[in-house]
Image: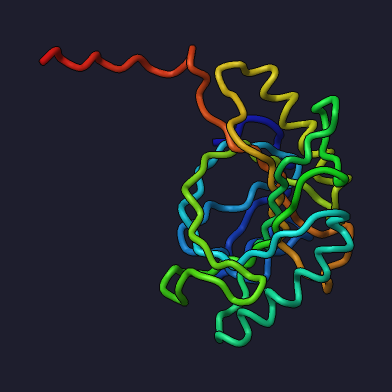
Amino acid sequence: MRVAGEVPDNVELVLEGEEWRFGRMRIEAPLPKGYPAPTPAGTMEIKTYPSVRRAEVTASGNSNLGSNLAFWPLFNHIKDRDIAMTSPVEMDYRGMASDDGKSLDESKGTWTMSFLYRTADLGPTGEDGRIKIVDTPPVTVLSIGMRGGYGMSKVNEGLAALREWLAAHPQWEACGEPRALNYNGPAVRMKDKWSEVQLPIRLAAASAPATAAAPLP
């Protein structure tokens, strides 16, 4: 459900085979089975993601530098198991809220980089060295589509827009930590890279539909 932003009249979100296109932006690798369509750059959507099996590496410190170190163990993990690369690469940020709560601070908390299995039957959960293979729970998110280079400044830019929307729509509330979905590899030029910044959300208690009381025994 699109909740903010407009797609230009001469630009469409298109799926050709397994490749998504939005103007000059492309997603070359397939998404996991059941994943919703990517959010076009400059728009905001509410959407629900199913459970997905993923391989993840958790670390702390500068995510722009550290993600290079996390990428190759994850790449070798799927290569050794003959698992095809999918998109996006997911980045989760935990415990990184700045002192004023308005942005993420990499001197705090941890980040997790994840490669997603196309389907859960491609391999078991467990551990592979420093890599953990886990099944994520389904999640509903508020998401903003972004264009341009990846990194913490882009995440904080998107996060500010998401929080501004939530402040204007109090029937929804954040219920988890932010994440970024990065769709492109290094071959795509910086200005055409496609990503999303997301916050898990739920209906606020005052807006949730009332449920019938259980009958007395």
Q: How many marks?
A: 0
Position of residue 90 relative to residue 44, above or below, is below
Image quadrant for the C terminus? top left
For this rendering, which residue is in front, 191 or 9?
Answer: 191
For this rendering, which residue is in front, 179 or 58?
Answer: 58
Position of residue 61 relative to residue 101, above or below, is below
Q: What residue is at 14 percent from the left and 12 percent from the top? A: 216
Q: Quadrant of residue 44?
A: top right
Q: Quadrant of residue 68?
A: bottom right
Q: Quadrant of residue 100?
A: top right
Q: Is residue 178 visible?
A: yes
Q: Position of residue 36 (x, y in %)?
A: 53, 52
Q: Position of residue 189 (x, y in %)?
A: 88, 66
Q: What residue is at 47 percent from the left and 76 percent from the top? A: 123
Is 56 left, or right, of 154 in this rendering? left
Q: Position of residue 113 (x, y in %)?
A: 70, 61
